[in-house]
Every structure is written in C-alpha cells, then in structure tokens.
Amino acid sequence: MALSQLELAFRVGAGLFVIVAPTLLFLALWRGLESMRDDELVERARQRAENTERSSTEWTVGRSPVSVVPNSGPNDSETAACPSCGTENRTGVTYCRECLGRIDDP
C-alpha cells in the first residue's frame, strides 16, 4: 500500500502546519499585545497601587509618618499553639497560619 506523492505531500504539509501554526499564532499575539502596551497607563496604575497601599498602612502627620495600629479585639491577646508545629495562632482559628495543620478547639 504505497502512498502517492500527492498524499505524502499533503501529510507532510499537514504535519508542518500542526507544528508551526501554534508558534506563529503565539508570536503574532505577543507582538500584538506589545504594540497595544501603554507604559504610561501601567506606570500610573503602579503609582496608584503604591499610594493606596501606603495610605492604608500609614498616615502622615506633618512630615513624620505615623503607623496605623488596627483596633485590637478581645481575642487578639489570646493565642493557641498548633499541635503540629507549635506556632502561636489566635484562638478560634481552624488552621495553623504556618503549617496549615488543623487546630482543635480546647
């Protein structure tokens, strides 16, 4: 059952298409995204995120920054040790913040 030259050429062409087409499509997408990139917009978004982060963690009084201390609730001073790793966790939590082991309530 010999393949004709036309059928062989078709199979080779189809194989090359399957191998090369995804790479070419990816490169075209990459170039298109690069051409649409707006560096000024990215920089403004980065500055806005930094300003939001800074304003949520500190206030400025005059020229000296003052750190914001969240209100401490009644359970903030109470801790429970994780039975797996011994890390101190707040009481009432289900899983350890360090090893993610289950903490059984006493």
Image (cartoon, rainbow, N blue to C red):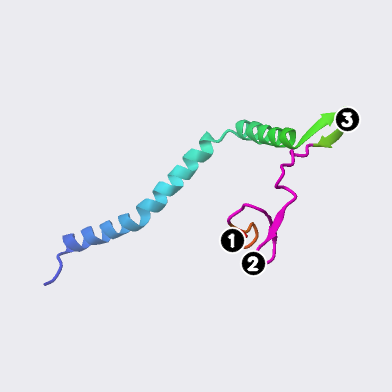
Q: Which residue is mark 2?
A: 83
Q: Nearer the viewer, mark 1 or mark 3?
A: 1
The answer for how far apart the CA atoms under marks 3 and 2 are is 46 Å
- Identified at 64% across, 67% down, the residue is 83
Q: Amino acid at mark 1?
A: Asp
Q: Secondary structure at mark 2?
A: loop
Residue most extreme to the bottom: 1
Q: Nearer the viewer, mark 3 or mark 2?
A: 2
Q: Position of residue 93 (x, y in %)?
A: 61, 53
Rendered image quadrant of residue 1? bottom left
Name the magenta segment's main secondary structure: loop
* Along the line of sight, the residue nearer the viewer: 29 or 75: 75
* Along the line of sight, the residue nearer the viewer: 60 or 74: 74
Q: Amino acid at mark 2?
A: Pro
- The question of residue 104 being in magenta is answered with no
Looking at the image, residue 36 lies above or below residue 6: above
Looking at the image, residue 85 lies above or below residue 42: below
First in sequence: mark 1 vs mark 3: 3
- The question of residue 72 being in magenta is answered with yes
10 Å crowding of disc 1: few (<14), some (14-19), many (20+): few
The answer for how far apart the CA atoms under marks 2 and 1 are is 8 Å
- Identified at 65% across, 31% down, the residue is 44
Please give the range of residues in magenta: 68-94
10 Å crowding of disc 2: few (<14), some (14-19), many (20+): few
Q: Nearer the viewer, mark 2 or mark 1?
A: 1
Q: Which residue is mark 3?
A: 63
Looking at the image, residue 24 lies above or below residue 103: above
